[in-house]
Amino acid sequence: MVDLKKLQKEIYQNKVDKGFNVTDVNKEFCLTYGEVAEAYEAWRKKKEDLGEELADVAIYLLGLSEILGIDLGDEIQKKVYKNSKREYKIIDGVNTRVREFDEESER
């Protein structure tokens, strides 16, 4: 499995080494948004570089996480667990959260 914490640090260091932005958080969010748009276009136009575009999105997210001091791997694990404890139902054609289990309600 990939060590996301290590990868975050490598991505950040590459940004520093190559002279890319590591201080303007607004700019990083905008660049990340741009990469998501490129990935969507690659998917929509059935381009062969979709995987590479998705990798760019992940790289920007990991770099931004390192800039902000957030362990993205840890946050992903916590969110996956949290999502697993939610109950959804289709209401008027929309998948709607109807219940969220926490540790106390499971006892």
Image (cartoon, rainbow, N blue to C red):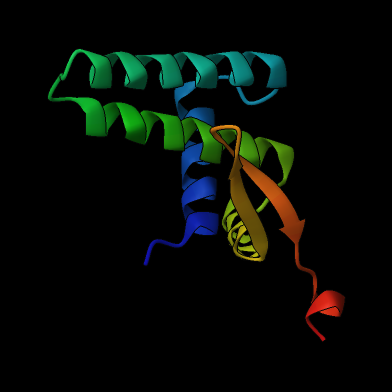
Out of 67 and 79, give the one closest to the viewer: 79
| Drawn side of residue 94 relative to residue 68, left or right | left
Residue furthest bottom in the image:
107
At a point 55% along the width and 57% down the height, the residue shown is 5
At a point 53% along the width and 17% down the height, the residue shown is 33
Do we see residue 20 in this rendering?
Answer: no
Q: In the rendered view, would you say 31 is above or below 102?
A: above
| Drawn side of residue 102 relative to residue 21, left or right | right
Q: In the rendered view, would you say 33 is above or below 14?
A: above
Rendered location of residue 9, percent (x, y): 54, 48
Residue furthest right in the image:
104
Tell me the quarter of the image containing the N terminus. Answer: bottom left
Quarter of the rendering containing residue 58? top left
Do we see residue 23 in this rendering?
Answer: yes
Rendered location of residue 68, percent (x, y): 72, 38
Residue furthest left in the image:
48
Q: In the rendered view, would you say 75 is above or below 15?
A: below
Rendered location of residue 34, percent (x, y): 47, 13
At a point 18% along the width and 25% down the height, the residue shown is 49
Rendered location of residue 75, percent (x, y): 65, 55
Quarter of the rendering containing residue 2? bottom left
| Drawn side of residue 25 relative to residue 55, left or right | right
Out of 48 and 9, give the one closest to the viewer: 48
